[in-house]
Image (tube, rainbow, N blue to C red):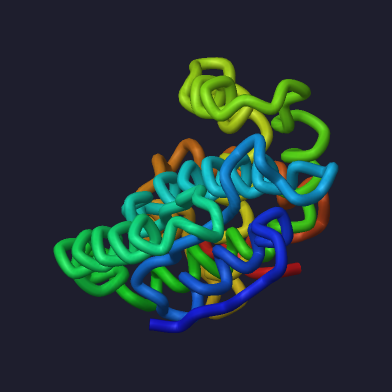
Amino acid sequence: MRLIRVMCSGRVDLEFILRAFANGQDGVFIGGCRLGECNYVTHGNFDALGNTLLAKMILTQIGVNPERLRIQFMNASDGILLAESINSFAKTIRELGPLGKGEGLDIGLMRLKLEAAKKLVPYLRLVERERLRLPEKSEEKYRKFYGSGEMRTLFDQLIVEKLAMAQIMLLLKESPLSTGEIAEKLSLKPSEVSNYMNVSSMHGLVAYDSAEKRFHLA
């Protein structure tokens, strides 16, 4: 198990979480001070909560079990709670099995999906700050919002297409592929891939080789 210490859980960036999984870690545990008891006026632990809930949605979207990511809030005197929380999390990870294998995913494809998500971090930071950060600091409201239909709609509108496109770009970086091959590799509908390819072609990102009947990076 690898431990990384930062002074405030609010500094646990989305990139840290996604990078850990992309590097093959089977689980990520984040410990922060109790909500409402932040030592800083920024209340960064609510940012950590929002980032964790958003990261869970991203993991689910790419096929990784979101239970591999957990956040727990406690104070400096909660040594027993910390030990119990880590032991409980370690038990969950053992039951889930190795990353990718436990999900039935090809390890290479899983890493590609995680790398695609990691490449979107600058955009995801902007989306989280502009559209997904709640003005009221309440754990109940954060969890309710991130589990709501409104959040699902925002996620579909703002993130799903860009995440799929990032995966497709990484696939095409490896080799030219047809619409059907891309759809099969990423478990997408061919019609969805066609739409993504049309948009990418208009932006000059990909080109179609009519002889080989495959797309490649422009």
Q: Residue furthest top?
A: 149
Number of callouts: 0
Above or below, comparing residue 106 to residue 39 in the picture: below
- Side (left or right) of 42 relative to 56: right
Q: Residue furthest front?
A: 77
The image position of residue 13, as x and y in percent, is 68, 60
Q: To which quarter of the image does residue 167 belong? A: bottom right
Q: Position of residue 56 (x, y in %)?
A: 46, 47
Viewer-side residue, 212 vs 62: 62
**72 sits to left or right of 156:** left
Which residue is depicted at the point 44% across and 56% down? 78
Query: In the shown orientation, is residue 44 left or right of residue 89?
Result: right
Q: Is residue 100 left or right of residue 56?
A: left
Which quarter of the figure has residue 159?
top right
Q: Residue at x 36, y 55 (%)?
A: 81
Foreground of the two, 178 or 71: 71
| Res 197 seen here | no
| As drawn, 136 above or below 29 | above
User: Does 196 sit above or below residue 135?
Assistant: below
Q: Residue at x 26, y 66 (%)?
A: 87
Q: Nearer the viewer, residue 214 or 181?
A: 181
The quarter of the image holding the N terminus is: bottom left
Where's the C terminus, which quadrant?
bottom right
Expressed as whole percent of the image width and height from the top left, the position of residue 209 reads 62, 66
User: In the image, residue 112 lies at what x, y percent?
Assistant: 49, 70
Q: Residue at x 63, y 49 (%)?
A: 48
- Asked whether the viewer can see residue 54, the reply is yes
> Residue most toward the left?
95
